[in-house]
Amino acid sequence: MQSGKINHENSALRKVRQKVANYMARLATLDEAFKTQSRLDAGQWIRDAADTVNVTITERLLIPRYKYVVQVMMDLQMGAGCHYLVKGYWDVESVSHTSITYTNSTSFCVCTVFGNLY
C-alpha cells in the first residue's frame, strides 16, 4: 500500500458491516408488513433504516474526517427482477463503501454506505 492511500478492505466502513447486517436482519418483519400494510409505510421504513445505519456509524466508529452517504432501497419480489448498481465517483484514494443485501421470500432491502475521508 502506498503512503497516503486507504486500504479499502480494512477501511472504517468494513468495521460496521456486521452491525449494519444485523440491523437489516431485523427487517425480517417486513415480510408480513409488506403484505398487510400500505406501501406508503415503506417510505418511513426506508428512512428509519437509513437513520439507524447513520447513527450506528457515527456513534460507534468515531472516526474524524469521514463524511457518510447512506442509501437504502427496499421493494417486493414479484418476479420482474431488479438490477442495482451503485458506485462512488469521488476521489478514488479517499472513498470506501460497503453494501449489505437482505432478502426473504417476498421482499428485499439493499443498504449501501459510502465513506469519504476528507
Image: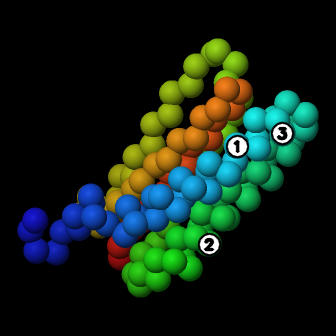
User: Which badge, 3 or 2, comes first in the chain's sequence?
Assistant: 3
Tell me the quadrant of the picture where the N terminus can be found.
bottom left
In space, the residues marked 3 and 1 are separated at their CA atoms by 9 Å
In space, the residues marked 1 and 2 are separated at their CA atoms by 20 Å
- Please state if 108 lies on the left or on the right of 101 as rendered: right
Marking on residue 55? 2
User: Which badge, 3 or 1, comes first in the chain's sequence?
Assistant: 1
In space, the residues marked 3 and 2 are separated at their CA atoms by 24 Å
Closest to the observer: 93 or 25? 25
- The mark closer to the camera, 3 or 1, is 1
Residue displayed at 80% across by 53% down: 44
Q: Secondary structure at mark 3?
A: helix
Q: Compared to 38, does 51 lie above or below?
A: below
Closest to the observer: 33 or 48? 33
Closest to the observer: 67 or 79? 79
User: Which badge, 1 or 2, comes first in the chain's sequence?
Assistant: 1
Q: Compared to 26, does 103 lie above or below?
A: above
Residue 34: image x %, image y %?
81, 35
The residue that mark 3 highlights is 33
Q: Residue furthest top?
A: 79
The residue that mark 1 highlights is 28
- Please state if 50 lies on the left or on the right of 62 as rendered: right
